[in-house]
Image (cartoon, helix red, strand yellow):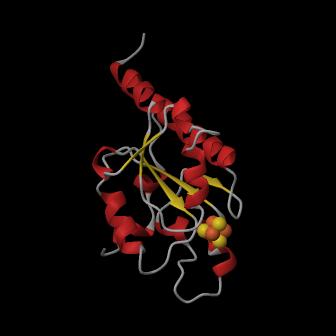
Amino acid sequence: MLKILDFFNYAQSESPWIVHFCSGCCSLEMAAATGPRYDWERYGYMQTPTPRQADVMIITGLVSKKILPALLRTFAQMPEPSYVLAIGACAYDGGPYNESVSVIKNMTEILPADAFVAGCPPKPEAIITGLDIIKEKMRKGEPSAASQGGLWKQMNF
Ligand code: SF4
């Protein structure tokens, strides 16, 4: 028998709202995923300007030390369960900016991601595939990686 919680998980997974927060040039591919060619709204994904109703945050590649507090503050305002998709080489280890002093190189250690999409930048269809992985986690009611740990919980932002 379908439990009420299963129903809520199913409903959330069929219409994940993605907070509109961009930090690196991967965000241009995220914009392409929303456009008429890939049109991620067909799959239920939608961007929202407020974190307070959002289910997913996408780390769009590069995160600088300057933008990190704003990113974490935005994520902290999202209601549980809130999931993270990391896209692009920069989100993993700084990518081409690995030697820059102003770039965060261990972003997924600070804010653990539920799925990672490789590329510089990844293609829009790859981003949608990464979101599908998160959709599956939501449907099963699995806890988000960021709720399980990560340095962000010990940081002041
Ligand atoms: S992975 Fe490439 S495209 Fe994405 S933010 Fe880094 S440099 Fe830009």
Q: Position of residue 89 (x, y in %)?
A: 67, 67
Residue 91 appears in which quarter of the rendering?
A: bottom right
Q: Is residue 110 left or right of residue 95?
A: left
Q: Quadrant of the C terminus?
A: bottom left
Q: Nearer the viewer, residue 14 or 139?
A: 14
Q: Residue at x 58, y 77 (%)?
A: 105
Q: Nearer the viewer, residue 95 or 46?
A: 46
Q: Quadrant of the N terminus?
A: top left
Q: Residue at x 60, y 40 (%)?
A: 133
Total labels drawn: 0
Q: Is residue 77 above or below residue 101?
A: above
Q: Residue at x 58, y 65 (%)?
A: 61
Q: Position of residue 135 (x, y in %)?
A: 53, 36
Q: Position of residue 41 (x, y in %)?
A: 51, 34
Location of ligand 1 given as a quarter of the image: bottom right
Q: Residue at x 68, y 61 (%)?
A: 121
Q: Is residue 104 above or below residue 22?
A: below
Q: Answer yes or no: is residue 92 visible.
A: no
